[in-house]
Amino acid sequence: MNPVVFMVLTRALAAGTPLLLGTLGEVIAERSGVLNLGVEGMMSLGAVTGFIVTFSTGSVLLGLLTAFAVGALASLLHAFASITLRANQVVSGLALTMLGLGLSGLLGKPYIGKPLTIRMEFIKIPLLGDIPILGKILFNQDPFFYLAVILGILAWIFMYRTRGGIALRSVGEHPQASEAQGIKVHAVRYVAVLTGGGLAGLAGAHLSLSYSSSWIEGMTAGRGWIVIALTIFALWNPLRAFIGAFLFGGIFVLQYLLQPLGISPSLLAMLPYVTTLMVLVLGGLSGDRRHMHAPAQLGEPYVKGERV
């Protein structure tokens, strides 16, 4: 295989890993009927806290757990506002993004420019890693990649092959009917939103612990907004999230490879976001819109006992 093509494919998987983690979390949250626009803020908080804990303790595992917990804790604010208080979910999510970005900048200021001495080593899967071409690309990656793939498969199995997944989807489609069946709508939504926040925190931790092994303010660079677009692109399906995440990972990589050709860096930096807009426009213009519909109650507050 051409070395350049091999490099692009390998780096595309790395660049797409945080997008996959974040998209899985948003898919779960939105399937319950809760729109969370705070992904960017939660990713940023996960990145800074994961880096600080790993830098201070020397434990990557502790850094990951902290990033997950902080992302979930941040999403709890949104869950309380949007589920319990029935506040506007768009406003609450935007506030969470601004809070997360501001707080992460404040917490991470003393750590700017400090490299992480502990690096995430690539893990080669026995036997599979020896497969020509595909083995080197798919089965010789860092632990975050394997974690994201496993979580994506588990999310799909849970959502479409378990009673819990049926409850999750029914809460997002018709909470009144779910309540009549004995499902605790608010509890399901809380768990879904907190899970989504935790995965967003892990996505941020990947950026600071593996992708760059450092903390830089603003390192999420709009990835949280791309995650929200990818959730629509994936049609709220965890398996489709794989396609979108790694496709956009490749677009991130291409913007750096095209710079030596004399193309403006500013123009290349726009590439992922222009592509995001194109995906949304093409999705809206799709001939078969039946499968493009979001969960019926997405963004709508639910009052227990209310009948329609």
Image (cartoon, rainbow, N blue to C red):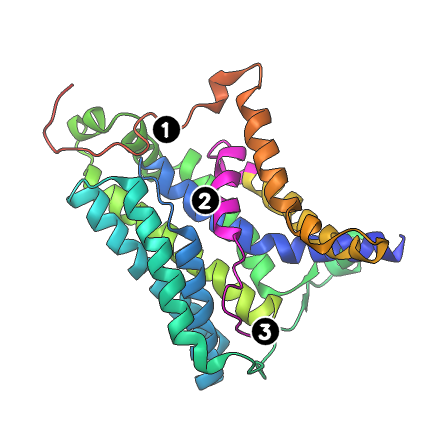
Picture quarter containing residue 167?
Answer: top left
Tell me the kind of residue under disc 1.
Answer: Pro
Can you tell which of label 2 and label 1 is closer to the viewer? 1
Is residue 70 positioned above or below 199 on the image?
A: below
Asked if labels 3 and 1 touch by Cβ distance under 8 angstroms, the answer is no
Of callouts 2 and 3, the N-terminal one: 2
The kind of secondary structure element at disc 3 is loop
Residue 47: x %, y % from top left: 47, 67
For mark 1, what is the residue? Answer: 295
- In this orientation, does residue 154 appear? no
Q: Which residues are magenta?
A: 213-240
Q: Considering only vertical position in the picture, is 229 above or below 108?
A: above
State the CA–CA distance, disc 1 to disc 3: 37 Å
Amino acid under label 3?
Answer: Ser
Which of the two labelled residues, at mark 1 and mark 3, occupies the earlier sequence position? Answer: 3
Residue at the disc numbered 2: 155
| Residue receiving disc 3 | 213
Crowding at dot 1, Cα within 10 Å, few <14 / some 14-19 / many 20+, comes out as many
Q: Is residue 223 magenta?
A: yes
Residue 96 placement: quadrant: bottom left
Which x, y percent locates residue 84? 16, 45
Which mark lies nearer to you, 2 or 3?
3
Residue beneath the point at 49% across and 31% down:
235
